[in-house]
Image (tube, helix red, strand yellow):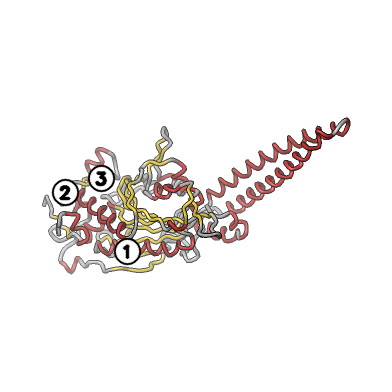
């Protein structure tokens, strides 16, 4: 959530942010009204309680008509105090609910608009010219079937649409990707983490995934637990309700977990193969930093993602995601999109999001400063995909395929695949 003090002092900035997101601007005024009622009823409660306490001292000393008058006033005060307290609680609850519906403040440099209004910041590498090489590229599913690596037909039989088996070399390729990604993250100072896939509502709501993204979340109603769509949820909540000493920052974690998404609203999109699925594995980077370090850390996360994709030999572009496509928690988000030859376009492989203090406020994760001036305040959280496995496999197979259906293995993965330089078809 955002800082209420900022809302009070600069509501126009919050309105502009909501407008840029394409979100409800009237929410700002509703929240200001609820906050004012909360504060005024709180002030009235304090005044009435003070009078009540003063009266309590006078009554034992009074007698006769004066005591009757004081007792009558005491009864009136008791009723008024209860009413003011109830009004304060109601207004505070309303303000809290409205505050949690507000998206994070959009960074001023974010391009304004919808999904297609992003800005391209950088392009890395060049696309292969398959025509010059004399063959037409196969798509990832055909390649995966040739390699004995992907089976979607049996997955559909067992689980339904948008599920898959990775078999043989496909399973080994996932393990290679995960191990290589964790190795890179560990070398960069991240602590490897295996995180829970089921979390409580406080963790899911605290990270902002029960707002506009709620339709994509799987909920186990009998247990009131949620299947995570990313280990970001478990990592963000790892220090929930804690105060972290400033000299421990930054805290960096690399989480590996299964991820589950309903993919609501994606009907008819990417139905072939394993690009858009309901369950997949992912290595996620997550950082806790001082708020003044957040923008620099955001750039660092992006550089680690670029290092990873470059090491995989992929052609990709970096985009500054537009305001209407940010998601509730992110103030700014950079995506790395890899070139998919058979689609003839770039597709998202990684994202790096700066959430500033938004998640930390909701999860009550705070930092204690150094020295005598070191107060307690919210810190900042950031997250960055390092390797979303199925999409990375899609990009690898299509970009590194050869005319005979074999696929070249990037050098960074070879130590994790027994030294293999090429993945060979098992069926021709």
Report the disc number at residue 248.
none
Q: In this view, does 377 lie above or below 307?
A: above
Secondary element at image label 1: helix
Secondary element at image label 2: loop
Task: Give the distance between the C-alpha atoms of the residues marked 1 and 3, in whole angstroms.
Answer: 27 Å
Mark 2 or mark 1, which has the lower sequence index? 2
Q: Which residue has dot 2 on it?
A: 148
Q: In this view, does 92 lie above or below 67?
A: below
Task: Give the distance between the C-alpha atoms of the residues marked 2 and 1, in whole angstroms.
Answer: 30 Å
Q: Residue at (42%, 58%) from the top-left corner?
A: 250
Is residue 324 in view?
no
Q: Which residue has dot 3 on it?
A: 164
At label 3, counting other C-alpha atoms closer than 10 Å, the crowd grade (few under 14, some 14-19, many 20 or more) is many
Q: Which residue has dot 1 on it?
A: 306
Image coordinates for residue 248, horizontal then vertical, percent:
43, 56
Q: Relative to 24, is 45 on the left or the right?
A: right
């Amino acid at each position: 959530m955002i800082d209420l003090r900022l809302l009070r002092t600069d509501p126009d900035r919050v309105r502009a942010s909501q407008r840029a997101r394409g979100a409800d601007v009237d929410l700002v005024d509703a929240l200001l009204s609820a906050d004012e009622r909360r504060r005024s009823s709180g002030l009235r409660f304090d005044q009435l309680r003070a009078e009540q306490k003063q009266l309590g001292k006078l009554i034992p000393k009074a007698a006769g008509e004066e005591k009757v008058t004081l007792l009558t006033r005491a009864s009136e005060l008791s009723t008024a105090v209860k009413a003011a307290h109830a009004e304060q609680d109601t207004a505070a609850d309303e303000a809290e609910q409205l505050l949690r519906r507000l998206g994070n403040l959009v960074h001023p440099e974010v391009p304004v608009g919808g999904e297609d209004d992003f800005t391209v910041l950088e392009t890395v590498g060049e696309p292969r010219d398959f025509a010059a090489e004399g063959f037409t590229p196969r798509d990832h599913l055909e390649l995966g079937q040739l390699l004995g690596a992907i089976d979607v037909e049996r997955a559909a039989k067992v689980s339904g649409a948008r599920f898959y088996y990775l078999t043989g070399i496909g399973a080994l390729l996932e393990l290679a990707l995960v191990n290589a990604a964790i190795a890179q993250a560990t070398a960069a100072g991240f602590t490897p983490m295996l995180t829970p896939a089921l979390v409580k509502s406080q963790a899911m709501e605290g990270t902002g995934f029960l707002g506009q993204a709620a339709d994509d979340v799987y909920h186990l109603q009998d247990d009131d637990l949620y299947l995570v769509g990313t280990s970001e949820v478990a990592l963000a909540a790892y220090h929930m309700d804690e105060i972290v000493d400033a000299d421990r920052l930054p805290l960096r974690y690399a989480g590996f977990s299964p991820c589950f998404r309903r993919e609501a609203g994606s009907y008819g999109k990417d139905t072939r193969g394993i690009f858009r699925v309901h369950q997949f594995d992912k290595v996620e980077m997550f950082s806790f930093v001082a708020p003044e370090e957040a923008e620099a850390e955001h750039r660092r996360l992006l550089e680690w993602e670029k290092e990873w994709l470059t090491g995989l030999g992929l052609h990709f572009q970096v985009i500054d995601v537009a305001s209407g496509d940010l998601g509730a928690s992110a103030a700014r988000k950079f995506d790395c999109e890899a070139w998919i030859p058979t689609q003839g376009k770039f597709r998202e492989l990684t994202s790096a999001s700066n959430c500033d203090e938004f998640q930390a406020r909701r999860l009550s994760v705070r930092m204690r400063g150094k020295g005598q001036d070191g107060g307690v305040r919210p810190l900042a959280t950031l997250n960055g995909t390092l390797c979303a496995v199925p999409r990375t496999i899609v990009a690898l197979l299509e970009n590194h395929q050869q005319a005979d259906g074999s696929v070249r293995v990037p050098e960074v993965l070879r130590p994790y695949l027994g030294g293999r330089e090429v993945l060979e078809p098992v069926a021709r």
